[in-house]
Image (cartoon, rainbow, N blue to C red):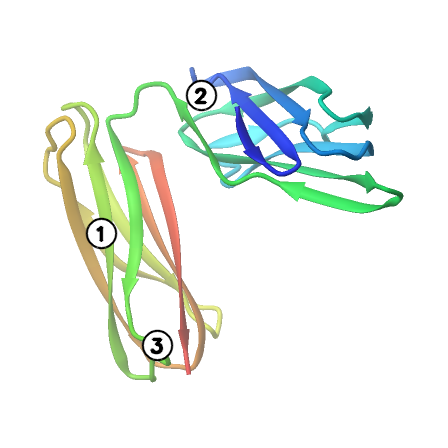
Amino acid sequence: MAMIHPIEYELSPSTIDAGTRWLTLRVKNLGSNVLTALDVRLNSLDAYSITVYGTGSYVATLTPEEEKQLFFQVLASTSTDLYVSIDGRKKSKPFHWESPSIPVTVGREIAELVSLVALTEPYLPVQKGVKCEAVVRGITQDGDLKLEFWANTPSGTFKELATIETKPLDIGEIARYSAEIVVSEAGAYTIYAYLYDGARRIGRKVEHIYVT
């Protein structure tokens, strides 16, 4: 079990088939204070890939060294990250806790969108070209992969930067693909990379750029 004080936690299983499934969350109080009125939630970082049903689980008390086992139903289509959040009271004061991202693999993907990075500089000026790089890793040798780059501009325009038909990847092989955007206005840009196997989206990453 992983631990972020004062909660030790474990979400299982880490690999599930597509469809409606159950995940088990174990939480343990490793602190010295009783935690009360806990609203325990399992949250998805991409509800398109995994949707978590329900509004959470209620735990009246979690005493020091006590462990609870909670169950969450999900609708899974592709792999993504989940995280746990807990709101309640500790020593009669409001208490909030949340876990880091927890990867959950759905089925057997043919490839993984590992990362998206904007290769930028601090205090980026307008009219500057910014290269955005995505890393794709092969898992199996089958599939028809396509990678798309999109950007949401400060004025609210959502525009396509590039669509790339990726090369066939061997198992474990890494490939890097890039697109460029000229930042023509000041403010916050959001860059998206989407990996498709045919018409099925199997990966999504987000990066942020701030232009002065």
Dot 3 amino acid type: Pro
Instruction: Say which label, 3 or 2, has the lower sequence index.
Output: 2
Residue 36 or 5: which is nearer the viewer?
5
Q: Which quadrant is home to the C terminus?
A: bottom left
Q: Using the image, determine if residue 95 lies above or below residue 43.
A: below
In percent of the image, x 53 and y 37: which residue is there? 47
Dot 1 amino acid type: Thr
Q: Report the disc number at residue 14.
A: 2
Cβ–Cβ under 8 Å for marks 3 and 1: no
Provide the residue designation for mark 1: 163
Give percent across and percent down for residue 10.
55, 23
Give the alpha-carbon distance from disc 3 to disc 1, as whole Å: 28 Å
In percent of the image, x 75 and y 33: which residue is there? 32
SS state under label 3: loop
Q: Quadrant of residue 64?
A: top right
Provide the residue designation for mark 3: 122
Q: Using the image, determine if residue 12 lies above or below residue 159.
A: above
Q: Residues within 10 Å of mark 3 (few under 14, many from 20)?
A: few
Give percent across and percent down for residue 136.
22, 41
Comparing marks 2 and 1, which lies closer to the viewer? 2
Instruction: Say which label, 2 or 1, has the lower sequence index.
Output: 2
Q: Locate residue 168 relative to residue 108 in the image: left or right.
A: left
Residue 110 or 69: which is nearer the viewer?
69
In the rendered image, the residue lying farthest to the front is 32
